[in-house]
Image (spheres, helix red, strand yellow):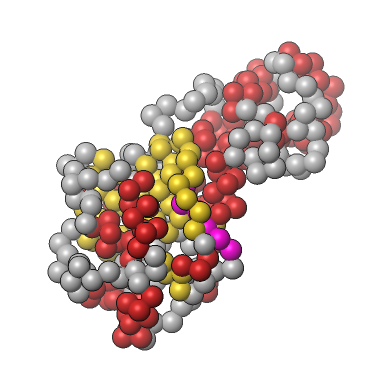
Amino acid sequence: MSMNIDVATPKRTRDIINKYGFSFKKSLGQNFLIDQNILRKIVSAAELDETKGALEIGPGIGALTQQLAQTAARVTAVEIDDRLIPILSDIFADTKNIHVEHGDVLKLDLKALMERQFAGLSGVSVVANLPYYVTTPILMKLLEEKLPLEHIVVMIQKEVAERMAAKPGGKEYGSLSVAVQYYCETELVCIVPHTVFIPQPNVDSAVIKLSVRKQPPVDVEDEDHYFRTVQACFAQRRKTIANNLTAYVGKANRDQLAPLLEKIGIDPSRRGETLSLQEFANLSKALIAAGF
């Protein structure tokens, strides 16, 4: 297929689906984007150029892949659905800078894949329209494995994007907000209505840009402990920090909590959603010092 013919139009998408007899698998959360304007916004947010690579997850029939290949030096698209591999190979037969990798991104050694595919490039970003049902596991894998990424620009469920970008004090702010903001600076790029997909999902989407930090914004003694502390504070959202932490340190140690919290300037009656990343860092440090 010529790279001049856009994949992401309603007609072209239906033509490809009909030509290859493709049927959507609900279990894989397949929704194909049919809006050129939104694709351009996604690609633009990733800040790619002819010296950089793009790692795409779940290319579908290649609407975003096509746009990425026109901007980046190299595109590697990881697709789990074996029925799409021959379709992608056919559509991009004449496009030299696209590599399609058949596999489950949650099981792949992404560091090795990136070394293999993007050697010699000045930077790599993940750019993807992620299936809703595996958004968080995929993003946490990308972040926890500390892959050498510049940006992660993904289209995800609007509600999840809002949670990732949320600031302390609101109902959207939770352990996901803290985890993502520990690793990245977050920016909501745009809201995407459900009407620009085939088939249409039930909810709206959003494009979020995560710029991977060189250093976390807070100093943490033990990352695992830090994230366990955060999880503990959000275990039951309606409960105070003191009550949630009681379950974490054990009822026998309850009396130690109030003085420990007061010492670091945190009112025990506050809730987890009011704590900043710095306050979580202070709390984790204090719990480690107290032997918890």
**In the rendered image, the vertical position of residue 221 relative to residue 60, given as above or below:** above
Q: Residue at x 59, y 28 (%)?
A: 277
Q: Residue at x 35, y 86 (%)?
A: 18
The residue sitting at the front extreme is 37
Quarter of the image where the C terminus is located? top right
Q: Does 164 appear in magenta?
A: no
Quarter of the image where the N terminus is located? bottom left
**Can residue 93 be seen from the camera position used here?**
no
Residue 291 screen position, x and y as percent: 68, 22
Horizontal side of 43 relative to 132 (left or right) equals left
Residue 248 screen position, x and y as percent: 74, 34
Q: Residue at x 52, y 72 (%)?
A: 200
**In the rendered image, the vertical position of residue 287 relative to residue 128, given as above or below:** above
Write the start and end of the magenta stretch as one range.
203-208
Horizontal side of 194 relative to 244 (left or right) equals left
Residue 237 screen position, x and y as percent: 75, 42
**Can residue 184 be seen from the camera position used here?**
yes
